[in-house]
């Protein structure tokens, strides 16, 4: 990383009120992409990033075949009754050849017999003994799937950087390929900081809260297909923090921490990061989220997220996710902003981007959105009740019910 490069990229911008888009751009500008790759059996490639072109060695389908159950015919012969000379089933081709006035009974997926050029569906034909009568109105080449119509031999269909989803698994399988090269997984080490944090299983003492950030991080990182190293809770003690940072940065590509990045008395994370590496501290013009650190210790990139549970999730989804997927080699992984109509008035101050927690719902033919209510950055329930962020853009002021707003859905088709 080159701090000078980031700083120049941010030239003219106030680090105490940095716009979300600028911060994202600055982070992106200095991230490397993972080079190492590995070969995995096809099923294990699900959720991984492809590191090779997939070039078909066969046409898919391999032969012209029927798209329907019916009769394979010569279109030019359809005026007169036809004579059925055999059957073609999927996997059991008809061995002969169609002569003038002949047809073959054919099932979906069966290879088109030699001489046939069209398929007439069985529902419309009339059978009179051996004679097959086809009504007028057929089209030449109808109901035929041609060899290579799905995938053509020699022409790359998938490229490095693509995420392997269920459709890609099927597509690769349809080519008979059982092993593929993917990027190695990104490794992320993370820990929570705070003297007030109790771990599950311990009784809460006065002034303590159970550490929840490591669990939201565990969930968010796991879903991105990342190798996790959960380093537990680290106390607000410079020696402990230094040890944790040194260890984490030696193990992982990226280190994520929560808490301790504001300027409170026990906020040593800032000091330690600055001592051990190149780190920038930003107050981002956003809500929730504001303070965030970004930088590098050794070879590991560092994200110092705020401590408040909602702020952790918002900064993760708005900055860290994009950065991790970029490093993991993924091409375009932006979550689209969609429009919904505000079902209620929304308070908003211009000059910062807000990520209110919303519930998108349908009313008649319209998609509308309301907030989950209380929007404090400690109210984690708001993230659980929500199914989207309502993204209120930097310049925008308060929204009146009925106006369109941008929403970012949490889930799609899984
Ligand atoms: P900090 O940024 O360290 O000042 O923390 C801000 C707020 O977030 C405080 O109320 C902390 O108690 C809370 N907090 C920090 N870390 C965690 C955590 N891991 N789990 C739950 N709450 C946390
Ligand atoms: Mg703290």
Image (cartoon, rainbow, N blue to C red):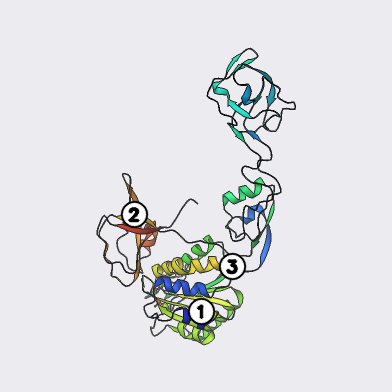
Q: Nearer the viewer, residue 111 or 203?
A: 111
Compare residues 264 and 58 and report the one nearer the observer: 58
| Disc number for residue 186 | 3
Distance, label 2 to label 3, CA atoms, is: 35 Å
- Residue 4 coordinates in the image, percent (x, y): 51, 83
Where residue 78 sits: x, y (%)?
60, 21
Q: CA distance from mark 2 to mark 1?
A: 36 Å
**Badge 3: how crowded within 10 Å, few (<14), some, or many (20+)?**
many
Q: Is residue 126 visible?
A: yes
Q: CA distance from mark 1 to mark 3?
A: 17 Å
Q: Number of numbered discs present?
A: 3
Which mark is first along the chain, 3 or 1?
Answer: 3
Q: Earlier in the sequence, mark 2 or mark 1?
A: 1
Answer yes or no: is residue 240 visible.
Answer: no
- On residue 340, the disc is 2
Quadrant for the N terminus in the image: bottom right
Front one among 210 and 172? 172
Give the mark nearest the N terminus, 2 or 3: 3
Label for residue 277? none
Q: Name the front one of labels 2 and 3.
A: 2
Q: Which mark is residue 295?
A: 1
Q: Say what secondary structure mark 2 lies in.
A: strand
Eye-nearest disc, 2 or 1: 2
For label 1, being within 8 Å of ligand 1 is answered no
Q: Position of residue 330 (x, y in %)?
A: 56, 63
């Amino acid at each position: 990383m080159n701090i000078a490069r980031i700083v120049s990229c941010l030239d003219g911008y106030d680090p105490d009120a940095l716009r979300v888009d600028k911060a994202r751009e600055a982070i992106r500008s200095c991230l490397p992409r993972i080079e190492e790759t590995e070969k995995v059996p096809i099923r294990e490639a699900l959720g991984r990033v492809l590191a090779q072109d997939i070039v078909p060695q066969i046409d898919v389908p391999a032969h012209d075949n029927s798209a329907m159950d019916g009769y394979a015919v010569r279109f030019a012969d359809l005026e007169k009754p036809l004579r059925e000379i055999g059957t073609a089933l999927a996997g059991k081709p008809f061995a002969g050849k169609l002569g003038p006035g002949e047809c073959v009974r054919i099932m979906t997926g069966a290879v088109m017999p030699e001489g046939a050029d069209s398929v007439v569906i069985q529902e419309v034909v009339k059978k009179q003994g051996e004679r097959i009568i086809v009504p007028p109105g057929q089209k030449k080449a109808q109901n035929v799937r041609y060899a290579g119509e799905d995938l053509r031999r020699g022409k790359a269909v998938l490229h490095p950087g693509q995420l392997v989803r269920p459709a890609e698994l099927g597509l690769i399988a349809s080519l008979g390929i059982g092993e593929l090269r993917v990027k190695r997984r990104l490794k992320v080490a993370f820990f929570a900081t705070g003297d007030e944090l109790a771990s599950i299983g311990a009784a809460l003492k006065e002034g303590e809260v159970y550490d929840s950030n490591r669990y939201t991080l565990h969930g968010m990182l796991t879903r991105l297909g990342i190798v996790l190293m959960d380093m537990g809770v680290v106390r607000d003690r410079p020696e402990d923090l230094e040890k944790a940072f040194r260890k984490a940065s030696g193990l992982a590509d990226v280190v994520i921490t929560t808490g301790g990045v504001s300027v409170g008395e026990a906020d040593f994370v800032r000091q330690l990061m600055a001592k051990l590496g190149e780190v920038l501290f930003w107050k981002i013009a956003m809500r929730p989220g504001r303070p965030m650190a970004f930088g590098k210790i050794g070879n590991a990139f560092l994200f110092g997220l705020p401590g408040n549970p909602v702020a952790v999730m918002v900064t993760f989804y708005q900055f860290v996710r994009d950065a991790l997927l970029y490093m993991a080699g993924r091409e375009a992984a932006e979550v689209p902003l969609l429009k919904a109509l505000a079902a209620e008035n929304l308070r908003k101050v211009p000059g910062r981007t807000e990520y209110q927690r919303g519930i998108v719902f349908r009313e008649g033919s319209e998609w509308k959105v309301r907030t989950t209510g209380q929007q404090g950055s400690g109210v984690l329930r708001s993230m659980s009740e929500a199914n989207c962020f309502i993204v209120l853009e930097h310049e925008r002021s308060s929204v009146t019910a009925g106006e369109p707003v941008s929403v970012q859905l949490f889930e799609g088709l899984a």
